[in-house]
Image: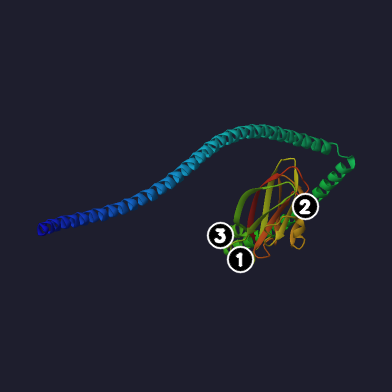
C-alpha cells in the first residue's frame, strides 16, 4: 500500500504545481493589467487635468471676449454719440457760417456805400476848391493855349515856307516847260513827289488815373530820297471830352514807362504840354534816334478819372 500512496500523491503534487503556475501567470497578467490600467488611469487623469485647464482657458477667453464685446458695444454707442455731436456741430457751424456770410455781405455793402459816399464827398470837395487853385488851373490852361498858339504859328510858318518852295519849283518847272516843252510831265512828278505818305496808324489806349501811357512808332522800311525828310503828323481825341492831358513826343524807344520822372533824360520834341481833345500837330526829326519815336500821354495829375485816347499818326516824306 505504501507504493500506491506514493504514486497517487505524485500526480496530486504535479496538479498543484500546474495550478500554482497558472495562478502565478494569472497573477502576473492581473498585475500587468493593473499596471496598464493604472497607466491608463494616470493618462486619463493627466488628460482630464489638461482638459480642465483648457476649459478654464476657454472660459477665460470667453469672459475676455464677452468683456471686449461689451467694450466694443460701449465704444459703438460712444462713436454714435460722437457722430451725432459732430453732425450737430457741423449744422451749428453751417448756421454760424451763414450768419457770418450775411454779416460779411452787410459789411461789404456798407463799405461800398461808404466808398460811394466818400467818392461823392471827394467830388464835392473838389467842386468847392479855392479860387486860387481854380485860377492856377486856368493859368496852366492859358499857358498851354499860348504854347499851342506858338506851335500853330510855327506850323503855319513852316507851311508857308513849304508853299513858297513849291511855288518856286512850279515857276522853275513852268519856265522849263516853256523852253523845252516837257513841263507838264515834270510838274506832275514834282507835286506827287513833294510830299508822300509813308504810313498811317490808328489806335487807342486807356490811361489810368495817376498813370502814364506810351506808344512807340517805328519808321520801318520806308526808303527816303537824298533830299527828303520825315514829318510826323498826329491828332488825337480824349474821352471825357472836357478833360485835358499832358502830351510829349520823344525821340527813340521809351517803353514800359510808369512815371514821367523816368523821361527826364529823353530827347523830346514836345515835352509836358497840357492839351485838350481834338489836338493836332506835326513835328520833324521825330525818328532821328533808332528810326523810332514815342508818344507819351501822362494822366498823373488826375487821381480819379481814367482817360481814353484815340489817335492817328502819319509819317510823310517831304522834299
**Residue placed at 41% from the left, 49% from the top?**
50
Q: Earlier in the sequence, mark 2 or mark 3?
A: 3
Quadrant position of residue 135: top right
Q: Nearer the viewer, residue 14 or 181?
A: 14
The residues tagged by marks 1 and 3 sit, at their Cα atoms, a distance apart of 20 Å
Q: Nearer the viewer, residue 139 or 106?
A: 106
In the rendering, at what x and y percent does residue 252 appear? 68, 62
Determine crowd level at label 1: few under 14, some 14-19, many 20+ residues with C-alpha closer than 10 A. Answer: few
Determine crowd level at label 3: few under 14, some 14-19, many 20+ residues with C-alpha closer than 10 A. Answer: few
Q: Earlier in the sequence, mark 1 or mark 3?
A: 3
Circles 1 and 2: CB atoms closer than 8 Å = no
* Local SS, label 2: strand
Residue that numbered label 3 is attached to: 185
* Local SS, label 1: loop
Q: Nearer the viewer, residue 216 or 277?
A: 216
Q: Is residue 212 left or right of residue 316?
A: right
Which callout, 2 or 3, points to the residue nearer the camera?
Answer: 2
Q: Is residue 76 left or right of residue 206?
A: left
* Local SS, label 3: helix
Q: Earlier in the sequence, mark 1 or mark 2?
A: 1
The residues tagged by marks 1 and 2 sit, at their Cα atoms, a distance apart of 33 Å
Residue that numbered label 2 is attached to: 273
Residue 216 visible to an observer of this rendering: yes
Residue that numbered label 1 is attached to: 225
Determine crowd level at label 2: few under 14, some 14-19, many 20+ residues with C-alpha closer than 10 A. Answer: many
Vertical position of residue 66 compared to residue 251: above or below: above
Quadrant position of residue 306: top right
Q: Is residue 310 left or right of residue 121?
A: left
Q: Nearer the viewer, residue 41 or 84?
A: 41
Amino acid at each position: 500500500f505504501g507504493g500506491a500512496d506514493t504514486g497517487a500523491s505524485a500526480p496530486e503534487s504535479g496538479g498543484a504545481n500546474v495550478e500554482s503556475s497558472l495562478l502565478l501567470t494569472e497573477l502576473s497578467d492581473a498585475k500587468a493589467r493593473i499596471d496598464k490600467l493604472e497607466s491608463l488611469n494616470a493618462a486619463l487623469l493627466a488628460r482630464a487635468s489638461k482638459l480642465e485647464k483648457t476649459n478654464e482657458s476657454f472660459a477665460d477667453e470667453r469672459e475676455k471676449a464677452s468683456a471686449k464685446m461689451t467694450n466694443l458695444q460701449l465704444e459703438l454707442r460712444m462713436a454714435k454719440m460722437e457722430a451725432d455731436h459732430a453732425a450737430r456741430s457741423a449744422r451749428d457751424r453751417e448756421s454760424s457760417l451763414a450768419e457770418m456770410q450775411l454779416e460779411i455781405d452787410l459789411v461789404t455793402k456798407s463799405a461800398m456805400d461808404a466808398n460811394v459816399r466818400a467818392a461823392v464827398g471827394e467830388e464835392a470837395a473838389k467842386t468847392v476848391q479855392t479860387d486860387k487853385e481854380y485860377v492856377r488851373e486856368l493859368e496852366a490852361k492859358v499857358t498851354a493855349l499860348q504854347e499851342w498858339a506858338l506851335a500853330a504859328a510855327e506850323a503855319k510858318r513852316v507851311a508857308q515856307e513849304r508853299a513858297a518852295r513849291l511855288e518856286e519849283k512850279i515857276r522853275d518847272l513852268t519856265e522849263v516847260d516853256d523852253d523845252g516843252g516837257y513841263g507838264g510831265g515834270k510838274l506832275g512828278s514834282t507835286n506827287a513827289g513833294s510830299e508822300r505818305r509813308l504810313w498811317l496808324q490808328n489806335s487807342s489806349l486807356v490811361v489810368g488815373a495817376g498813370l502814364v501811357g506810351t506808344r512807340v512808332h517805328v519808321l520801318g522800311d520806308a526808303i527816303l530820297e537824298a533830299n527828303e525828310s520825315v514829318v510826323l503828323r498826329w491828332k488825337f481825341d480824349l474821352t471825357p471830352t472836357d478833360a485835358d492831358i499832358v502830351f510829349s513826343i520823344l525821340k527813340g524807344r521809351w517803353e514800359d514807362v510808369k512815371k514821367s520822372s523816368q523821361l527826364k533824360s529823353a530827347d523830346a520834341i514836345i515835352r509836358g504840354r497840357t492839351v485838350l481833345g481834338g489836338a493836332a500837330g506835326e513835328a520833324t526829326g521825330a525818328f532821328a534816334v533808332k528810326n523810332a519815336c514815342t508818344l507819351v500821354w501822362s494822366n498823373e495829375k488826375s487821381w480819379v478819372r481814367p482817360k481814353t485816347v484815340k489817335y492817328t499818326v502819319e509819317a510823310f516824306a517831304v522834299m
